[in-house]
Each structure stands twice: as structure tokens, then as C-alpha cells.
Image: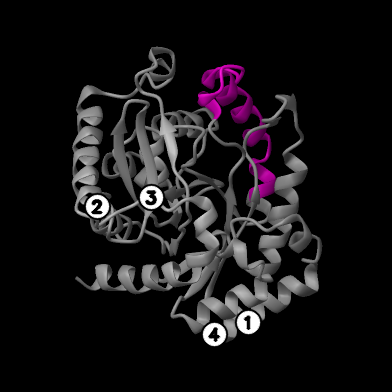
Amino acid sequence: MRIGIDNYGLYPLELSPLKILQWAKDNGAEGVHFSGLTYKKREKVDESYLKELAKFAASNNMYLEWGGGEHIPYETSTWKKKDIFSVNLKAAKEATVLGTRIIRSCSGGLIRWHRESPMTETLLEEMAKNLSSQKQMLKDHNVILAIETHFEFTTHEQLRLFDMCDAEPGDYLGICLDTMNLLTMLEDPSEAAERILPWVVSTHIKDGGLLLTSDGFISFPTEINKGVINLKQIIERISLLPWEVNLSIEDHGGSFVLPVFDSLFLSKFPDLTVQEFASLLKMADKTADAVQKGQLAIVEREEWPEICEARLKQDIKALKELIKS
């Protein structure tokens, strides 16, 4: 299993994709998952530039994974219908030039945090119709749309989506497993990873913490092997899959409030069990203990630009040590 980075962690540096690859190589990473580019950077990425990226990666035995995919057929700021076929076709063509099968898809944000958002079942139905119609296009380009475990759907709901799309693991739809985002969707990362395991084709390896406050839970990213997520167990399970899965470290600042004391909010997670909620409480207790001892702290987003390089370097080192242990 190769260890690399997601380019999001270096966003504040505003590096070109080629320079990000060079940074990764210089700092012991074995590849880059380009989950997204700024509008200015994306404008400059044409076929010749993609070929240059592919050549650099091949000559240095590095993996490449791409982004730019979407799975929610709406503009999530207005909830107007959106054509995502053309978006995914563009990403598929770019991935083909790069020689990668992986296109990470991320379409939204904290959807059920907002009262005006459509019902989850409505979104699943519309997604299923749209993604099913893209099956042949994605297969023709030999790519997999890797839907991230983001802040949109739980693993229970993603499994229902795959069933509605009549998809099979390793076919045209898969999962980009973000280990920390699972906390934000009120899932025990180990339990959720096990649920969705057969569909994992890509990763965002990210440790995290969880605190219980008067506003509810607060989730946040931490340095690899400093948080409460059992990354070793999850990675060991991923290693048993019948295809190679790269371990792309994603790290960033910020935190997320999960208002679990709001009955309406909590009702939007009908698959959450008492057992899994209890696991979250245990992780919150463990996080609070680490914070009290000065071993852990939330990094605010405005602090991230100053520490992003040092933190990612340490993450790479820590993940390599974790794999060997």
C-alpha cells in the first residue's frame, strides 16, 4: 500500500499540480490524490499538462488519483437542478489521460445541517437516476467515480445508493474513504469502514478527535496517530481488498459542530444505533482526556497555512511508522 497525500492539505501554498507532485516526492510521499484544484489552477490544466503530470509520476513511480467529480445533481447553494454528466465526463477524460481509474467525487457540504435542504431520500433517488445514466460513460473511460464519505450521506445511505444504481464493487462507482469525516456524520469510523469496505477504492487517511460540549459534539482533524480513530485497524482491513488502495493523507484545520441535542437534527440520522452513539461518547471522553493533558488541540483554519507543510511531513512519517508497527 503506497502512502501519499491529498493536495487539499497544501492548498494555502497555491502550488501548481506539478509542484505538488515535486513536494510529495521530496517529502517521502509515493503519490498524490488531486481531489480538487482552485479555479485558476484548473483553467491551466489541459491535455499536455496532464501528460506532463503523468510522465513525472511514472518516472518517479508515484501514483496519481484525480478529482472534479460530482454525484449530487443540484447546485447545493440554491437547490436548482444541475447537469453533472458533463462534469463527470470532463473528469473521466482527464483521468484517462493521467492513466488513473480514480475520480474523487464530492458535491456538497453539511447538507442536513440546513433546514432548507431536500430530504435525504429525495437526494438518493435523484442521484441514483443520474449516476445510473452515467454507467456506460464511466465504464467506457475505465474509471470509477469514488464518492467521498463526506458531510452528505452516511455509509448506510451510500450502500442504499449503490443498490439503487445496480452497481457492483470495483465497477463504476466506489468509495473514497475519509476516515475522519465519518465522525462528523455520527459514525464510528471502524464500524463505518467495515460497512462500506467492499466499495473502497480510494482514501483520505485522516485522524480526528471528538468533543462533547453544550452545543453537541465537535469533530476535528488531528495529526496522524494522535487522535481517537483506529487507523491501523481500518488500514489492515483495506489491505485485504482484491485491488490496490493507496493511502492518501488529507489534513487541514477547522472543526465541525454536530448539534446532537437538537431532536430534528438527530432525527436525520435514522440508522444511528445506541451502540454506535455509545462508541462516539467513548471517543469524546478519550479526546477530552487528551485535550486536558495538552496532547491534543483544535487547529483553527486560519492557523493552517502556517503549519500545513510541517504537519503533512509529520503525517507522512507517522503513517509510515503506523503501517510498520
Q: Could you tell which of marks 3 and 2 lies nearer the N-terminus? A: 2
Residue 280 rendering spot, x and y as whole percentages: 25, 35
Q: Name the residue under label 3.
A: 298
Would you name the residue on which mark 2 appears? 230
Residue 242 lies in quadrant:
bottom left
Residue 182 position by quadrant: top left
115 within the magenta span? yes
Q: What residue type is labelled 2?
A: Asn
Q: How far apart are marks 2 and 1 (CA)?
A: 34 Å
Q: Residue 56 carries which label?
A: 1
Determine the residue positioned at 58% across, 18% down. Answer: 122
* Residues at marks 3 and 1, CA–CA distance in whole angstroms: 36 Å
Please state which amino acid type lies under the numbered disc 1.
Phe
Asked whether disc 4 touches disc 1, contact meaning CB atoms under 8 Å apart, the reply is yes
As helix, strand or loop, the secondary structure at mark 1 comes to: helix
**Left/right of residue 119 with respect to residue 319 in the rendered view:** right
Q: Mark 4 points at which residue?
A: 60
Q: Does the magenta stretch include residue 21?
A: no
Q: What residue type is labelled 4?
A: Asn
Amino acid tagged 3 = Ile
Q: Which quadrant of the view contains residue 51?
A: bottom right
- Closer to the N terminus: mark 3 or mark 1? 1
Closer to us: 169 or 120: 120
In the image, residue 204 sits, relative to residue 75, either above or below, namely below
- Quadrant holding the N terminus: bottom left
Q: How far apart are marks 3 and 4 (CA)?
A: 35 Å
